[in-house]
Image (spheres, grey):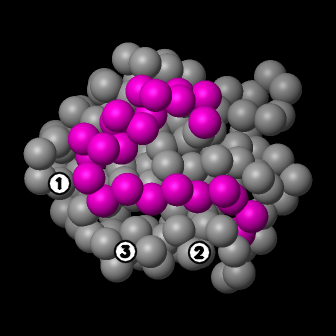
Amino acid sequence: MKLKAIGSTRGKRVLYVDDDEALVLLTIRKLTRLGYIATGETDPVAALARFRDSPREFDAVVTDLSMPRMTGFDLSREILAIRSDIPVVLTSGFVRPEDQDKAHRIGLRALIVKPNSVDDLGVELDRLFTSASTPGKPA
């Protein structure tokens, strides 16, 4: 399935964080083709600093779960403490039931299992932004 960004998603700004540089480059390229303005970071600490400096620069954050220096859960908590309204999506190659529970408790909007996360991410972001732009419908 080829996904195309629709009016409500075109131009949305996404911060993508993963310690795998090749995956960051691939995902940024894919999201850009879908009409998003995508920014990638391979260091979660640098990503958090960037977000802290300009929290309104992004419309969504996508982060890997397992990274050196800071987990995706910790990064998500910090980001949501700065801006509780921003959609945060977690990706991981392995998701345990307790990870799903924790993601829900933290307030993450979605948890996507890799390796299909690049295509799934486009679909999930489209769903999040479309539902957020529909009056009376929660994101």
Q: Which residue is mark 3?
A: 23
Q: In the rendered structure, which disc, 2 or 1, sits on the residue that comes first in sequence?
A: 2
Q: Which residue is mark 2?
A: 30
Q: Residue at x 19, y 62 (%)?
A: 94
Q: Give how far apart the Cα atoms at labels 3 and 2 are.
A: 10 Å
Helix, strand or loop status at disc 3: helix
Q: Which residue is mark 1?
A: 67
Check the image and name the residue furthest to the front. 53
- Mark 2 residue crowding within 10 angstroms, few (<14) / some (14–19) / many (20+): some
Taking the image as drawn, is residue 136 in sight?
yes
Q: Residue at x 83, y 34 (%)?
A: 134
Which is nearer the eye, 4 or 75? Answer: 75
Give percent across and percent down for residue 66. Answer: 17, 54
Please tell me whether residue 136 is drawn above or below residue 128 in the rendered image: above
Give percent across and percent down for residue 9. Answer: 76, 52
Tell me the kind of residue under disc 1: Met
Q: Give how far apart the Cα atoms at labels 3 and 1 are.
A: 13 Å
